[in-house]
Amino acid sequence: MKTNHIKEEFLSFFKLKPSPRSWHIPFLAGLAVGIPLIFGYFLGDIKSALTASLAGLVIIYIPTSNDFIETMMKMFVCSFGMIISYGLGLTFSFNLWIASLVFGIFSAIAYYIARYFNLKPPGSFFFIMMASMAIGLPHNLELIPRRIGIFTIGTVNACLICLIYSFLNSKKETNKNLTTFHINPYVNLVESFIIGICMLVSVFIGKFFNLDYPYWIPISSLAVLQGVNQYHIWKRGLHRIIGTTIGLGIAWLIFSYITSPLLICFCIISLQIIVEMLITRHYALAVMFLTPMGILLAETGSSTSLNPDYLLKMRLLEILIGSTIGCIGGWFLYNERIRFSSIKNLKKSKIALSKSFQRDK
């Protein structure tokens, strides 16, 4: 029985799940990331372009609804949230203790708000990711307005792409599947607190040990914590480690043989499209391409000049640390979810019985 289970798990690693997302989304994501890169290349400022491209990831939150106004409203809200997240990270990155505490509190609040409004996957992930990457940058008070401005341009570009897409899509679709923000009354505060603690510890470790790329630790930890249960959390952790290891090999090849800034831009665009095609179908396979794309995108113009061997070793170390924190946090998260689910079901049963009793009267 145990052997069959291991065999099933092994075979499932090679299976692709059907994707619930529209096939348009990967190409929209490619445009949102790619347009700033192309402009940056021709204007001679790849560093700023990469920051704008990072902001373009907000397009991942494009809703499935065909309602034009609702779609744009959600995109504007998410864009504003991303700008706040990035600005918060830049502002409080000046001190180890303050940065860790603020990031932990922010992560807990962002997670709670995403759950409260039933924000669909990736939920709070990219908001926390943007704050993490901003906190990892060297603190420079004078550059904060400029960085936020460039980041805002990236979100505006994504919203314009979404505007054009929604307009064209609404022409073809006659049946509108309206969706709105649905408030979830059963939101677990303790679960948000656990996420916040994991993010606090992740940033603290990265900054305390003066790691060159500390933001990879909370990002890896949060990616693992996205699992829906303990089994899924540990599985995601394993998949992330396997996918990252292979992805580092791909990254090493890119760094070793591709030196042209224009080719690097096209590599990032291609990798982004591939990642969005795979992320809902096979997590480990997506991480193989997410790893080199993340390294190229996150280093904001400096990755091409760094030592590839050193950069990839640090990336692997931080992934392992982050995944370990995520798995430990996942154990606490899973047990809290069991307790909270039991309490929630008891409350629902009590309400149902109360209504039934009133009807009988």
Image: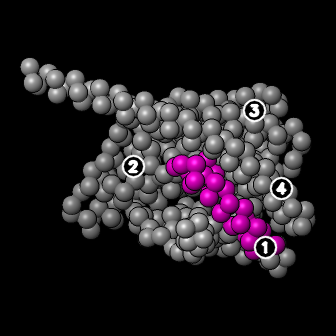
Q: Tell me the quarter of the image containing the N terminus.
A: bottom right
In space, the residues marked 4 and 2 are separated at their CA atoms by 40 Å
Q: Where is 249 relative to 311, above or below?
A: below
Q: Which residues are magenta?
A: 224-252
The disc, 4 or 3, on the residue closer to the chain's N-terminal end is: 3
Q: Which residue is mark 1?
A: 249
Specify the amino acid type for callout 3.
Ser
Residue under the point 49% across and 51% down: 121
The disc, 4 or 2, on the residue closer to the chain's N-terminal end is: 2
Q: Which residue is mark 3?
A: 100
Residue 228 included in the magenta stretch of the image: yes
Query: Dot 1, crowdedness within 10 Å: few (<14), some or many (≥20)?
Result: some
The disc, 2 or 1, on the residue closer to the chain's N-terminal end is: 2
* Residue 294 appears left or right of 184: right
Q: Which residue is mark 4?
A: 317
In space, the residues marked 4 and 3 are separated at their CA atoms by 20 Å
Q: Where is 91 relative to 300, above or below?
A: above
Q: Tell me the quarter of the image containing the C terminus.
A: top left
Helix, strand, or loop for circle 4?
helix
Q: Is 18 in front, or is 105?
A: 18
The disc, 1 or 4, on the residue closer to the chain's N-terminal end is: 1
Query: Dot 4, crowdedness within 10 Å: few (<14), some or many (≥20)?
Result: some
Where residue 306 sits in the image (x, y, percent)? Answer: 88, 63
